[in-house]
Image: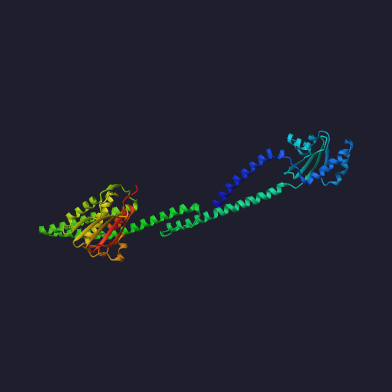
Amino acid sequence: MKNLFARLYLLLLIAIVGLGWGVEQLYQHYGQRQQVTNDLDLHRGTLFLLDGELRRRPEAQRASFVDAIQPSFGFPLQLFQRQPELQLKQLTGLVLSAQQRDYLQQGGVITWFDDDGGHSWFVRQLSGTQHLIVLGPIVTGSAGHADLVYLILFLAGLGIFVFAWAMPISRGLMTLTQTATKFGQGDFSARAKANVSAPLQNLVERFNAMAERIQRLLKSHKELSHGISHELRTPIARLRFAMEMVRELDDPKAVAKYLDTMDDNIEQLDGLVDELLTYARFDREEPLLQLHLEDMSELADLVLENFRLTEPQLQFQLTTETPLPLIHCDREAVMRMLDNLIRNAVRYAATVVEVNLTIRQQQLLVAVNDDGPGVPVESRSSLFEPFVRLDKSRDRKSGGIGLGLAIVKRYVKLHRGEVRIDDSPLGGASFILSWPVQQSE
């Protein structure tokens, strides 16, 4: 806080003092030595009476008259008769301008102030002559001391203003530093307070966004590490067991059976690696969608056709409630979402898996329905988290590692949409995707 306050205060101090000094120099050069004429009511009457008294006396007696009445004044009184302007310049340093001479001839009074010395003079021209009546120097007190007081007050006020300006910023920076320290020491839930001064608002928002992303990445990596350690264990154990059996068996049919088991487990490992890499990519960077106009009925039918070949025991249906326009979407992402949702439905369906496409209020709705046991309401929101499955057993026939639905959720969010679970009209679960028909690039 001290450094911030000192630097800002020094900057303002140099700027204001420099500007003040420059203005003062201009004023002294152009203004102070050529003081604008004016009448000073305080001495106008005195000079008028002196003018009348001196005009009634012969010129030779005027100087002695001034000397005689001088003690009655509390300041010097002089009458310049010979070369009056030169005498005035020698006394005061004032050089009369043409404007001031005209003003004196009209009976005006010129006032001249010496702020540095604290003196003032009042000059009137004796009527009908070129002689000058001069009152002064009259001590008015030096303005230097007053200026110093004003300068001190100004600088003190400036300091208070700068301190008041710097205080919230310094407090906000200290709070942000403390939060960053806690975060660096392992408290990944630490966040900076949002109620900071305006200059720090953007910094705090960026820090909190960064902290949120780091915490999410660490949580995801922890979940991935934990999930991988469990998911790899089962297929690897099966592979090891099958290899041992193959070495010991002589029956060709039994050997072929265990080789098929090994092949199935290798496929399971391949699928596991593919899902892990896809999910990890979302944490590393947000994939950029390649948006094009696509025929959703065609994409859904392509995905369903693959399952018709591999799952002949089930019926796969595609229905549309309305004629569908071409939809803005990423072809690869949509096919991946449909594949994951249909694969999930296949694990639990009894006889039928249906994909229904429709448009509602400029939103595309893709519903994947099955006639399986359904999903309990209390479990629906958690199913889209990574490594979450309804069946806690990790070696059941249905398979899966709990990443498919998490990947679906990430992809549909990139399309500015959402995914939810409802009851299927077939009696099981209905996984419903929705996103705007028109997507911004």
Residue 78 located left or right of residue 240: right
Quadrant (top left, top right, bottom left, bottom right) of the N terminus: bottom right
Q: Is residue 190 above or below residue 292?
A: below
> Residue 223's spot in the image, x, y percent?
32, 59
Residue 165 located left or right of residue 333: right
> Residue 61's spot in the image, x, y percent?
89, 38
Quadrant position of residue 360? bottom left
Residue 6 seen in this snapshot: yes
For image coordinates 38% across by 55% down, the residue present is 213
Q: Is residue 66 above or below residue 153?
A: above
Colouring used for the render: rainbow
> Residue 397's spot in the image, x, y percent?
20, 62
Q: Is residue 116 above or below residue 343?
A: above
| Residue 195 vs residue 338, the one in the foreground | 338
**Number of on-image labels:** 0
| Residue 223 vs residue 99, the one in the foreground | 99
Q: Residue furthest front?
A: 322
For image coordinates 38% across by 57% down, the residue present is 215
> Residue 36's spot in the image, x, y percent?
72, 40
| Residue 239 vs residue 364, the one in the foreground | 364
Residue 53 located left or right of residue 244: right
Residue 272 seen in this snapshot: no
| Residue 267 vs residue 367, the one in the foreground | 367
